[in-house]
């Protein structure tokens, strides 16, 4: 990949610096040069939608990646298999897992997200309208009429899973998923544009502690603000990074942080209107069910499955802790 990418960067962007690949990412391939950040994504997303998302990001100001155009003026390159986009590299930034975020971090984050939501709601371009018309994949999966039947089938297959912590998780979560399906109701709020995957690891802070950038906008779609805020609050009240990488944490262990939730909501409300608290948690529950259902389908549709990785994904979607959060809102 490196050699063709170097050639493309020189021909399309006049970038001649050495290219270094970043390891540890499963959904995209990420590369760095001295002054640029390059994202390479498989072209599974329809090209018009991908282009619309980049166009909308380009219309926002502050806290979004600065996208460079090609010699021909496009925001990305489609090589037939991948989309390649180039951003200005921000030096000296890092993400902070939720447990290490101070209240000042959280308040600044809430204010920034509120301003971004305000900006998104004011966009009236064809690109914005296209994104707003597209539902998130996890939302669609949660309302698939076949979901309940598939989950019942998985219940009978759970005993064949060789990795016992995953098996234990599914034995506790599958009945809850089946119980919740008949009660799923999308938020009645007006639909807007959401980031789509907004959590602590997407927030990039500078050495001065200030929020510099919100990353990974490729999941933008049309959804209620209840979803976006509920998803963010769910992640703020758990340690996303530690849950993902530390296999020693028991599945049911979960530390709520009501002061973080309260600070976030108060600061957001200074700029933009807050949705109903129950609506936020209902939307997060819908998202969690859609994600969990997708991972379960992966488990049973492939002969060679990395059960440990799938277990890490599934445990982050713990349905019980989302229900428990309601008491703090």
Image (cartoon, helix red, strand yellow):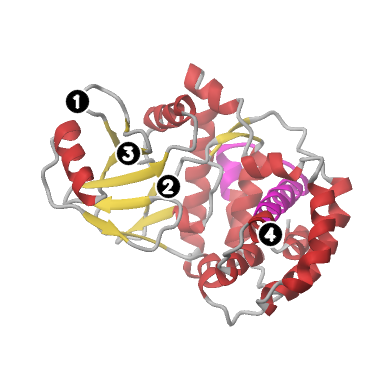
Q: Nearer the viewer, residue 213 or 132?
A: 132
The quarter of the picture where residue 22 lies is bottom left
**Whole-percent x and y of residue 310?**
60, 65
Residue at the image point whose x is 19% and y is 31% from the top: 12
Name which of mark 4 and mark 3 comes first in the sequence: 3
Name which of mark 2 and mark 3 comes first in the sequence: 3
SS under mark 2:
strand
Residues under numbered marks 4 and 3 in contact, where contact means CB atoms less than 8 Å apart? no
Q: Mark 2 sits on what residue? A: 214
Which residue occupies the extreme left position in the image?
16
The overriding secondary structure of the stretch rendered in magenta is: helix
SS under mark 4:
helix
In the image, 48: left or right of 65? right
Magenta stretch, residue numbers: 267-294
Q: Mark 1 sits on what residue? A: 71
Q: Mark 3 sits on what residue? A: 84
Residue at the image point whose x is 53% and y is 37% from the top: 220
Residue at the image point whose x is 43% and y is 64% from the top: 96
Distance, label 1 to label 2, CA atoms, is: 26 Å
């Amino acid at each position: 990949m490196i050699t063709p990418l170097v050639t493309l960067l020189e021909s399309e962007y006049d970038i001649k610096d050495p290219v270094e690949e970043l390891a540890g990412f499963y959904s995209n391939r990420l590369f760095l040069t001295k002054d640029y950040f390059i994202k390479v994504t498989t072209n599974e997303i329809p090209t018009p939608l991908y282009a619309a998302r980049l166009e909308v990001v380009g219309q926002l100001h502050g806290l979004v990646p600065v996208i460079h155009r090609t010699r021909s003026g496009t925001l990305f390159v489609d090589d037939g298999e991948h989309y390649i986009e180039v951003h200005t590299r921000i030096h000296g930034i890092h993400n902070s897992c939720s447990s290490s975020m101070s209240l000042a971090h959280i308040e600044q984050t809430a204010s920034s997200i509120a301003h971004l939501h305000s900006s998104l709601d004011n966009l009236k371009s064809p690109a914005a309208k296209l994104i707003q018309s597209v539902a998130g994949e996890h939302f669609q999966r949660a309302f698939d009429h076949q979901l309940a039947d598939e989950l019942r089938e998985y219940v009978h297959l759970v005993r064949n899973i060789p990795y016992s912590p995953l098996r234990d998780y599914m034995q506790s979560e599958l009945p809850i998923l089946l119980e919740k399906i008949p009660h799923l109701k999308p938020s009645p709020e007006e639909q807007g544009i959401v980031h789509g995957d907004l959590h602590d690891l997407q927030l990039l802070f500078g050495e001065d502690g200030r929020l510099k950038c919100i990353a990974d906008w490729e999941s933008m779609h049309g959804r209620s603000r209840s979803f976006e805020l509920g998803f963010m609050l769910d992640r703020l009240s758990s340690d996303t990074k530690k849950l993902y990488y530390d296999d020693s944490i028991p599945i049911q262990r979960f530390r709520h942080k009501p002061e973080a939730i309260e600070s976030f909501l108060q600061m957001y409300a200074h700029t933009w209107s807050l949705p109903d608290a129950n609506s936020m948690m209902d939307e997060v529950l819908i998202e969690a069910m859609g994600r969990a259902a997708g991972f379960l389908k992966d488990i049973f549709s492939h002969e060679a499955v990395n059960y440990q990785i799938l277990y890490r994904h599934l445990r982050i979607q713990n349905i019980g802790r989302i229900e428990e959060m309601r008491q703090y809102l």
